[in-house]
């Protein structure tokens, strides 16, 4: 490892020209911030202008660093100290691991101070940041905390209706407890309160605006349309979708095989962004709300709170970001309703939806930005300044659209096959739900059925047996053990 390469490529690092023994706070604040965040490295022997000056006695410095951490940090973070030699000079590299026993405090100046990383600085945690660290160290999340609101005092009409519509199952009283929406004393958790028809968490709101032109100050008029929504997260989601649909347009163009759909924004990408904004926002931040701002050339969806681990999303490979959920109880409920996957990167799904769009160009790639208090996704209008007569279709995109068009005949064939099969209503409902997710193309397993319907493995096995007996599915090879696909019915 060369320090020059490490410094040039890494943002989670700090540097000190020498060990300041009499001013331990000057460098221990970075140790605290790294342990409280995503981890990082502190390099001794590097000047402010990133010149590699080295240390006179690296071994002595490393011993003093270790002792200072033991006596002035609470709790003691997980660290790795290394003496690094380069160009005839010695350096100390202090690697600080991301900790789970947060907050990690610096003990000094007559008190305990927890630091967090903001950009390239380590600053004292404010009240909200400290709350986050305390919850992380206690292994609890905001949405799992019990409230003073009794379950019997609130209605969940929206949640029950959408749950029934999307899962083909009723939401029972016991489900509220097992999903983490109600505690053992019958009181709502924050997740339950956010999903109630009249949510008592007043700062859970959605502001939607269709601006005139390309910015918020066109000089002609401020907004063409606006809406402020409060209530259940389900209400906010539906209102957000409706607002976008009402303030965007859809084009069509004839082809040799029919016509190609050309929306301004991929519908699934918009839905994914709104869902993520509502689920993953930081509800500890008061006086703020989710915003949907529509301009002529783009949509900006902004939510309070940055990435859960404090990283800057614009510096990450968004195709391979590990899913970390700030509000796992809420996320689980939305996953059960098939609004989002339990695994995988939503960023990649959003970008993939754009890549398959007819008018996609590299400059229209969705952009993601986050800082300590905000997350913003920008979706670009695929049809902006593109005359419809100049739209050209490449073979892959036409083929993709043909697959979408072909879905309806496939659905008709499936329904005909299902209607002719001998099975009870619950089995047919499960077959429909499975087909909606997997179609004729994708394989599924017993474990997929367990997750989808939240049933025991033995019950999932019975579903597979019934579907096989009905002639609806068959085993497939080459895709792992115990995989099945729906059978295309013969004419």
Image: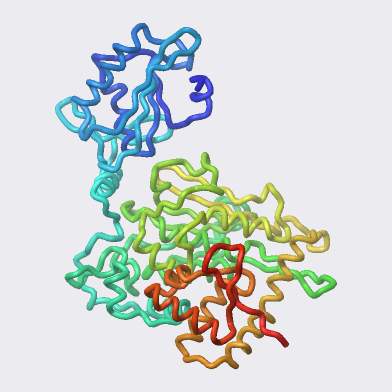
Q: Position of residue 39 (x, y in %)?
A: 37, 35
Question: Does the image show residue 202?
Answer: yes
Q: Residue at x 44, y 81 (%)?
A: 462
Can residue 221 be seen at all in this image of the molecule? no
Q: Residue at x 42, y 71 (%)?
A: 450
| Residue 255 location, quadrant | bottom right
Farthest right residue? 256
Q: Quadrant of residue 96?
A: top left
Residue depicted at 23% across the width and 32% down the height: 76
Rendered location of residue 62, percent (x, y): 31, 17
- In the displayed structure image, the side of residue 406 where residue 339 appears, left or right: left
In this view, the residue in front, 367 or 210, is 367
Instruction: Specify the color scheme.
Output: rainbow
Residue 37: percent from left, percent from top = 35, 39
The residue drawn where x is 29% and y is 56% is 142
Above or below 53: residue 416? below
**Residue 417 position in % (x across, y down):** 62, 88
Asked if residue 70 lies left or right of residue 37, the reply is left
Q: Residue furthest left?
A: 110
Q: Nearer the viewer, residue 354 or 453?
A: 453
Total marks in image = 0
Quadrant for residue 97, please give it.
top left
Q: Quadrant of the C terminus?
A: bottom right
Q: In terms of depth relative to the viewer, which is nearer, 81 or 26?
A: 81
């Amino acid at each position: 490892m060369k320090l020059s390469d490490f410094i040039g490529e890494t943002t989670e690092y700090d540097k000190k020209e020498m060990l300041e023994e009499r001013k331990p706070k000057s460098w221990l604040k970075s140790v605290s911030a790294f342990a409280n965040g995503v981890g990082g490295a502190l390099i001794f022997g590097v000047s402010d202008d990133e010149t590699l000056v080295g240390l006179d006695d690296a071994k002595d410095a490393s011993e003093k660093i270790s002792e200072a951490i033991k006596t002035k940090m609470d709790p003691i973070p997980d660290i790795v100290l290394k003496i690094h030699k380069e160009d005839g000079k010695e350096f100390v590299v202090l690697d600080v691991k991301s900790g789970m026993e947060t907050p990690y405090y610096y003990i000094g100046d007559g008190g305990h101070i927890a630091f967090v990383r903001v950009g390239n600085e380590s600053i004292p945690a404010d009240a909200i940041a400290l709350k986050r660290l305390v919850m992380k160290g206690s292994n609890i999340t905001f949405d799992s905390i019990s409230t003073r609101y009794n379950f019997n005092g609130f209605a969940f009409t929206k949640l029950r209706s959408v749950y029934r519509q999307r899962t083909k199952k009723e939401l029972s009283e016991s489900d509220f407890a097992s999903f983490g929406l109600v505690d053992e004393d019958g009181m709502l958790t924050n997740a339950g309160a956010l999903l109630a028809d009249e949510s008592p968490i007043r700062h859970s709101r959605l502001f939607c605006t269709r601006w005139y032109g390309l910015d918020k100050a066109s000089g002609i008029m401020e907004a063409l349309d606006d809406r402020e929504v409060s209530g259940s997260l389900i209400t906010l989601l539906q209102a957000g979708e409706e607002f976008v649909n009402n303030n965007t347009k859809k084009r069509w163009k004839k082809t040799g095989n029919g016509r190609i759909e050309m929306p301004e924004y991929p519908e699934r990408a918009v839905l994914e962004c709104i869902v993520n904004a509502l689920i993953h926002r930081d509800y500890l931040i008061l006086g703020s709300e989710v915003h949907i701002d529509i301009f002529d050339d783009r949509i900006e969806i902004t939510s309070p709170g940055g990435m859960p681990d404090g990283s800057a999303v614009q510096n990450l490979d968004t195709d391979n970001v590990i899913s970390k959920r700030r509000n796992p109880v809420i996320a689980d409920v939305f996953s059960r309703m098939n609004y989002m996957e339990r695994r995988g990167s939503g960023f990649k799904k959003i970008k993939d939806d754009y890549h398959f769009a007819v008018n996609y160009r590299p400059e229209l790639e969705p952009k993601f930005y986050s800082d300590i208090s905000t997350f913003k996704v920008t979706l670009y209008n695929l049809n902006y300044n593109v005359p419809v007569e100049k739209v050209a279709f490449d073979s892959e995109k036409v083929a993709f659209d043909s697959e979408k068009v072909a879905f309806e005949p496939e659905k008709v064939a499936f329904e005909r096959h299902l209607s002719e099969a001998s099975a009870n209503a619950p089995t047919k409902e499960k077959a429909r739900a499975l087909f909606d997710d997997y179609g004729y193309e994708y394989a599924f397993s017993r474990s997929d059925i367990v997750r989808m319907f939240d049933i025991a493995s033995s019950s999932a096995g019975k579903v597979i047996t019934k579907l096989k007996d009905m002639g609806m599915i068959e085993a497939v090879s080459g895709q792992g053990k115990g995989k099945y696909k729906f059978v295309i019915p013969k004419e």
